[in-house]
Amino acid sequence: MTTHVSETTGGWWGSLIQSARNKSTDAIEFMKRDLTEFGKTVQSDASRAVTQTSSTLKDTLKAENTASATARVKDGGSNFLEE
């Protein structure tokens, strides 16, 4: 009877376990690919945001009057050193 139980256990039960393992492996591989794609997208979007912000900041600083900006820096530096 022990032999019969082992054969039954190895048969449909083993098949069920193997099927679950295969499905789990497939799900894990899918999640790995999905997370890799997500990471690349986040990295690309962040890089684009930094580039755009840098460009906007440069344009804003260029648009300011240089003399006015210099005066503000001097005043700020003087006030900082006086305190």
Image (tube, rainbow, N blue to C red):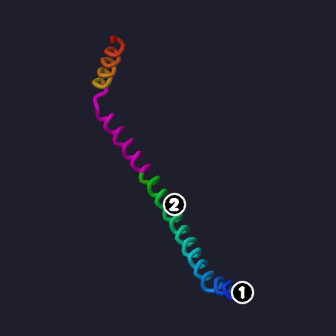
Q: Residue furthest front?
A: 1
Q: What numbered label is drawn on residue 13?
A: none
Residue 50 lies in the magenta stretch: yes
Q: Residue 14's x, y, as percent? A: 63, 81
What amino acid type is highlighted by mark number 1?
A: Thr
Q: Quadrant of residue 79?
A: top left
Q: Secondary structure at mark 1?
A: helix
Amino acid tagged 2: Thr
Q: Counting other residues with Cα less than 10 Å from the Cα at mark 1, is it few (<14), some (14-19), or many (20 or more)? A: few
- Quadrant of the image occupied by residue 55: top left
Q: Nearer the viewer, mark 1 or mark 2?
A: 1
Report how far apart the C-alphas of labels 1 and 2 lie in the structure: 47 Å
- Is residue 5 rendered to the left or right of residue 69? right
Q: Please tell me whether mark 2 sits on a helix, a strand or a loop.
A: helix
Tell me where residue 59 appears, x and y as whole percent.
33, 39
Residue at position x 59%, y 77% in the image: 17
Residue beneath disc 2: 36
**Is 74 situated above or below 17?**
above
Q: Residue at x 27, y 24 (%)?
A: 68
- Tag 1 and tag 2, C-beta contact below 8 Å: no
Is the stretch drawn in magenta largely helix, strand or loop?
helix
Q: Is residue 75 above or below residue 54?
A: above
Q: Quick one: which residue is furthest to the right in this view?
A: 3
Residue 38 is left or right of residue 69, and the answer is: right
Residue under label 1, please give it: 3
> Nearest the camera: 9 or 23?
9
Above-or-below relation of 82 to 18? above
Magenta part of the protein: which range?
46-66
Return the x and y of residue 26 as percentages of the image width and height: 55, 72
Q: Label 2 crowding class (10 Å Cα cut-off): few <14, some 14-19, many 20+? A: few
Q: Exactly how many numbered labels are in the figure?
A: 2
